[in-house]
Image (cartoon, grey):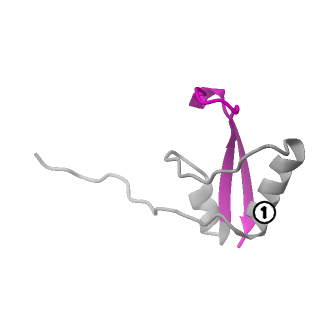
Amino acid sequence: MTREFIHHDIALETTADGDLYDTMVASLLAEDPTARVIPYCLSGGTDGKAFSRLGMRCLRFHAAPASADWTFPECSTVSMNGAG
């Protein structure tokens, strides 16, 4: 068996800090003061790779219900892009 890569791309990661992250947290807490912000990594397609080439960070958050049995489809996704 041989394996051939037909697509090569960059891998991205970022930290949970900075003005953009702080703004996201403040926005969530303004709507729900009891919200808990938990950074995590989610694989999948993203426009973050295109933004990274412009020197911009791309962060996303998923607003999930505060229950132990929530499932991913119940989440809403919001993207925020910002410089540096």
Q: Looking at the picture, does residue 31 appear above or below residue 54?
A: above
Q: Quick one: 15 or 52, which is closer to the camera?
A: 15
Q: Quadrant of the N terminus?
A: top left
Q: Residue at x 61, y 52 (%)?
A: 47
Q: Residue at x 46, y 63 (%)?
A: 10
> Would residue 36 appear left or right of 32 to someone viewing this image?
left
Q: Quadrant of the C terminus?
A: bottom right
- Hey, which quadrant is residue 21 in on the image? bottom right
Q: Position of residue 52 (x, y in %)?
A: 61, 66
Q: Looking at the picture, does residue 75 appear above or below residue 20?
A: above
Within 10 Å of disc 1 (Cα), the crowding (few <14, some 14-19, many 20+) is: few
To which residue does mark 1 refer?
22
Under mark 1, the amino acid is Asp
Q: Quick one: 5 or 63, which is closer to the camera?
A: 63
Q: Position of residue 55 (x, y in %)?
A: 65, 72
What SS does tag 1 mark?
A: helix
- List the single residue furthest toward the left: 1
Magenta extent? 57-84
Q: Looking at the picture, does residue 9 appear above or below residue 19?
A: above
Q: Position of residue 42 (x, y in %)?
A: 53, 47
Q: Residue at x 74, y 54 (%)?
A: 80
> Would residue 31 appear left or right of 63 to someone viewing this image?
right
Q: Position of residue 53 (x, y in %)?
A: 60, 68
> Would residue 65 appear left or right of 40 to someone viewing this image?
right
How many marks can you see? 1
Q: Residue at x 46, y 62 (%)?
A: 11
